[in-house]
Image (cartoon, grey):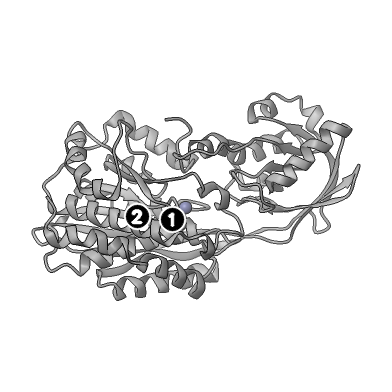
Amino acid sequence: VLPAEVRDHQPQLTASHGAADTVQSLTTEVGPRLAGSAGDKLAVTWAIAAMKARGLSNVHTEKVTVKHWERGVETATLVAPTRHNLAVTALGWSGATPPKGVEAPVVRFDSLEALKKADPASVAKKIVFLDVHTRRSVDGHGYGEAVPTRRYGPEVAAKKGAVAIVIRSIGTDHLRFAHTGETHFTDAKGAFPAGALSNPDADLLAHVLEARGEARMSLVLTPRVLPDAESANVVGEIPGREKPNEVVLLGAHLDSWDLGTGALDDGAGCAILLEAGRALAALSQKPRRTVRIVLFAQEENGLTGGEEYARAHAADAAQVVVAAEADSGSDRVVKLRVRGGPEASAALTSLTPVVAPLNVTSDGERAFGGADIWPLAALGVPLLDLEQDFSRYFDVHHTANDTFAQIDADALAQASAAYATVAWSVADSAASFGRIPEGEREKAKALASDKPATPAKK
Ligand SMILES: [Zn+2]
């Protein structure tokens, strides 16, 4: 099982605030880093230095051409029957209103299905309000259930002749922070104004419509699409001492939304992996196989980093023993899960005692992976989840409130210890997780295009 040096690292790592310090460094020295922005470029430079400083080897960048969308002015005002400013933010890839905005009556729908069924005459020339709540859950499935409203609602509203759409934020808080996130237009020329209202403002609008039967809103959103830009996946390794070509791949994403400083999403994931990497690089004996850390470009509004990585490395995907992604904030790891071939369950059984001292357990559920590694799963690469507690994550996710103040340093240290010990154990063993069966690879491809971040149903 674990050599004493690694076992002794668990309490050391769980008592260390190294990962929290890393998030503080990223959020203060770089800040927001939406793909294509100046912050994105700075983040790549930061990540190279951070990997080198932690003793990783083969530190390098792999070029990714990223799509570039930039937020503009964003205001929403309820103008009748009462007047009130609403907290709003544009969804990623939203189109723009005219500079002075649009003003129109609001029509509310309580589900994406209801909007799809609506008579276009009831929607035309109006602002659609898509009012779907996000349920709080430890495993985050409430987010997975709500996210299709954000992804598909805007295009449905556009095709029915609406002038704009606002959705209730996909988030579990009751603060006046609006949650951004990617939306999708089949044809970029069809992009139209799409915003999210904070939960309390969505409540107000719903109450006004119910009590007064009508509401008028003025909405200004002026984002723009800029030419493609250059970014990079940043890679560093702890080279295996016996089988360096066999790789345990740990991923997180370096980009973030622009509203906050991306402390939880995904500064925390980057920090977990950098801290685990630091601990492994410091050991006197390296594991048999290579541990590779990849900090992916443009997860949030394009998935171009994960897709480019899988494309560039398709030929050696068979050498990736297993892939895991840290993209769930700074709360504790609670579950260990795997998804692969028939061999995967024996591999899981051997790992369970390794993380038991950290109060991590396994259940019958299979690993879900993460957006950046689904393109690898589509090639058959098996998945390993060190699933974190999601209960608080969607309070802050994709808001201006995603800053260092939200970081739980102790929980982040536990997560770093879990990643470090699991990565060491898999890399030092001959364990096989098999391959994801052909029939399940299609599902991974569909996940990569839908990008729900957490499963809708378990
Ligand atoms: Zn993320």
Q: Residue at x 39, y 56 (%)?
A: 411
Q: Quadrant of residue 287?
A: bottom left
Q: Which of the two residues, 433 or 407, is positioned nearer the viewer here?
A: 407
Question: Assess mark 1: CB under 8 A from ligand 1?
Answer: no
Residue at mark 2: 415
Q: Residue at x 35, y 72 (%)?
A: 50
What's the CA distance linking mark 1 and mark 2?
8 Å
x and y percent of residue 44 in the render?
42, 69
- Residue 297 visible in this rendered orientation of the protein: no
Q: Quadrant of residue 216?
A: top right
Q: Residue at x 68, y 51 (%)?
A: 95
Q: Which of the two residues, 75 or 209, is positioned nearer the viewer here?
A: 209
Q: Which of the two residues, 117 or 19, is positioned nearer the viewer here?
A: 19
Tell me the amino acid under the disc marked 2: Ala
Characterize the local packing of mark 1: few (<14), some (14-19) or many (20 or more) Cα atoms within 10 angstroms: many
Q: Residue at x 68, y 45 (%)?
A: 199
